[in-house]
Image: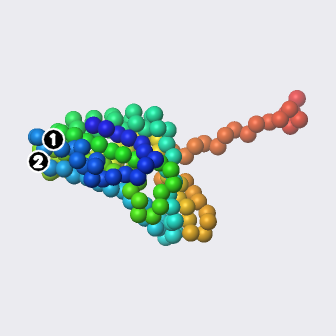
Amino acid sequence: MTFAISAEVIDPETLKARLAAARAGACVSFEGWVRDHNDGEPVTALEYETHAELAVKEGEKVLAEACARFDVALAACVHRVGLLKIGECAVWVGASAEHRGAAFDACRYIIDEIKQRLPIWKKEHYANGASAWVNCATPAAPAPARLSAANQTP
């Protein structure tokens, strides 16, 4: 089991090879790619940021849960950070198991949990030059206004 954050291009074939296990009769993988649109807006790139230490710690928990829940031999996930172009792989998930059903179930569980639980933030860059953070599960509350000494009432 390995979870990693990477600024480097993801190589799915190398990652898949690491899931080989004598007891495994199936390997399932998922690749999340940068697409050219979202909600009707043309997208030119995505930018990912993370709190890497926390993301890796929680990512390892997700992989362990998947292995235990679905009787998976091996599981792995790599998530990119930085500026990604259209068509690049942003996240790769893989699981090997004795049977295909467990591998499919584990793969879906891992990507769904990663998207919900990890401190990874996505910024979309649009064709019109604008950009916006999207799919943030819990937006930050606005900071309280600070009063300067001149603005305080006695």
Mark 2–mark 1 Cα distance, whole angstroms, equals: 8 Å
- Residue 150 relative to residue 142: left or right: right
Q: How is the image coloured?
A: rainbow
Label 1, secondary structure: give it: loop
Label 2, secondary structure: give it: loop
Q: What is the x, y in percent for residue 2?
A: 31, 38
Instruction: Indicate the quadrant containing the C terminus: top left, top right, bottom left or bottom right.
Output: top right
- Camera sees residue 70: no
Q: Residue at x 11, y 47 (%)?
A: 25
Name which quarter of the figure residue 74 lies in.
top left
Q: What is the x, y in percent for residue 19?
A: 22, 44
In this rendering, the count of numbered labels is: 2
- Camera sees residue 36: yes
Q: Which residue is mark 2?
A: 25
Q: What is the x, y in percent for residue 9?
A: 41, 52
- Residue 2 relative to residue 147: left or right: left
Instruction: Indicate the quadrant containing the N terminus: top left, top right, bottom left or bottom right.
Output: top left
Q: Residue at x 67, y 40 (%)?
A: 143
Q: Is residue 148 above or below residue 26?
A: above
Q: Is residue 83 above or below residue 153?
A: below
Q: What is the x, y in percent for residue 145?
A: 73, 39
Confirm or deny contact between disc 2 and disc 1 (CB under 8 A): no
- Crowdedness of circle 2 by 10 Å Cα count: few (<14), some, many (20+)? some
Q: Amino acid at mark 1?
A: Ala
- The nearer-to-camera label among 2 and 1 is 1
Q: Residue at x 33, y 52 (%)?
A: 11
Q: Is residue 82 above or below residue 69?
A: below
Q: Which residue is mark 1?
A: 21
